[in-house]
Image (tube, grey):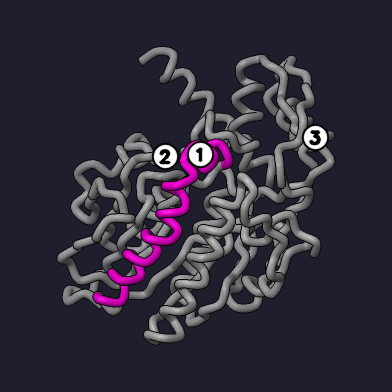
Amino acid sequence: MAANSQPVSVVTGGAGFLGSHLTDRLLAEGHRVIAIDNLITGHLTNIEHLAGNENYRFIKQDVTRYLFVPDEIDYVFHFASPASPIDYLELPIPTLKVGALGTHNTLGLAKAKKATFLLASTSECYGDPLVHPQKEDYWGNVNPIGPRGVYDEAKRFAEAMTMAYHRYHGMDTKIVRIFNTYGPRMRLRDGRVVPAFIGQALGGTPLTIFGDGSQTRSFCYVSDLIDGIFRLSQSDFHEPVNIGNPREMTIKQFAQEIIRITGTQSGIEYKPLPVDDPKVRQPDIGRARQILQWEPKVQFEEGITTTIDYFQKWLARANHP
C-alpha cells in the first residue's frame, strides 16, 4: 500500500457512467483516485462535482497508448470502453482496441506497481445464451463476426488476458461480469433501453420496442452494482463474478412500467429486432452471494424513480443553459 497508508486507485473510463460512480465510492472509502478517460463516451459533467478535491486527479488520455503514472498505486480498475450498442457499433475499432491494447496497458501498469487489477467485463460474454439464468461457468453463445462481436469478443479477450497475467505473473486480478445497470449519469441517447425509454416518455414520443418485447433483461441499480464491485476488489477471488439483479422482466413489461411511473401519454411502437440481440438476460448471483455476501438492495421502483428525476433535471438544464 502507498507509503502514507491511503490507498491509491486508478480508474480508467473514470468520466463514464460506472467509472464516475466507482470513483465516488472509492473516495468515500478513503482512497486517492486517479481517473483516466479520453472522453470518447465519458463526459466531464459526471465528475464536475469532484473539482478541487485534493484526493482526486483527472488525466485525459487514451489507455490504448502507453500509460505512465508516477504515483504508487494499489488498485487499477479498468472500466474504459464504449459499452452501449450505439457506441460500439459507431466505434467498432476503438472498442476492440480498448479491450485488447487497453487491457494490456492497464495490466502492465498494475504489474509494474504491484497493484490489484479489476477488469470490468460484461454479461455480453454470454452472447445470446442457451443457458438460463447465466452462471459464471457457462462459456457463452457469441457470434464473433456479428456486429455485436466487437464488444463481446473484446471483453472475452480482456478476460483471457487478465487470467493469463494472474496465472503467469501471479498477479492479484479480479473480473466482474456486469449485467444491465441503470441510474443517474447515463447518457440520454446512448442507445440502451433505460435512457431510451425514459427519454421517449419524458418527450411524449412513443417508446420503441425492438422485436415483440418478449426478450428479457434484469436491471440493477448503480449503487448496488458499485457495492458488489468494491466488495470484489477487497476479496481474494480471481475468477469471474456476476454482479447484477436477478429480477427479470420483459422489455414490454419494462416499457409499461416507465409509462406508468412517468405518467406519460406515450404509446409503444415496434421495430425489427437487431442482429444477435440476446433473447434472455438474467444473472445467477450465487457466487456473489457466497463469496462477497452481496445481493442487490435497491427496489426497482425506487431506483427507476431516482433515474427519471435525474433525466428530468438534465433535460431542464439542457433546454435552459
Identify which residue is drawn at 51% across, 72% down. 160
The Cα–Cα distance between marks 3 and 2, rounded to whole angstroms, is: 27 Å
Q: Which residue is mark 1?
A: 87
Side (left or right) of 192 relative to 16 = right
Circle 3 packing at 10 Å, graded few (<14), some (14-19), many (20+), is: some
Total numbered labels: 3
Q: Which mark is residue 41?
A: 2
Identify which residue is drawn at 77% across, 19% down. 267
Q: Which residue is mark 3?
A: 211
In this rendering, the label closer to the viewer, 1 or 2: 1
The Cα–Cα distance between marks 1 and 3, rounded to whole angstroms, is: 21 Å
- Cβ–Cβ below 8 Å for labels 1 and 2? yes
Q: Mark 1 or 2 closer to N-term?
A: 2
- Cβ–Cβ below 8 Å for labels 1 and 3? no
Q: Mark 1 or 3 closer to N-term?
A: 1
Tell me where residue 319 sits by quadrant. Answer: top left
Q: Amino acid at mark 3?
A: Gly
Tell me where residue 212 sits by quadrant. Answer: top right
The image shows residue 73 at horizontal and vertical percentages of 25, 70
Q: Is residue 147 magenta?
A: no
> Relative to residue 317, is residue 310 depicted above or below?
below
- The answer to whether residue 298 is seen in the rendering is no
Q: Which residues are magenta?
A: 85-112
Q: Amino acid at mark 2?
A: Thr
Q: Amino acid at mark 1?
A: Asp
- 43 or 103, which lies in front? 103
Q: Mark 3 or 2 closer to N-term?
A: 2
Magenta residues: mostly which secondary structure?
helix
Identify which residue is drawn at 42% across, 47% down. 94
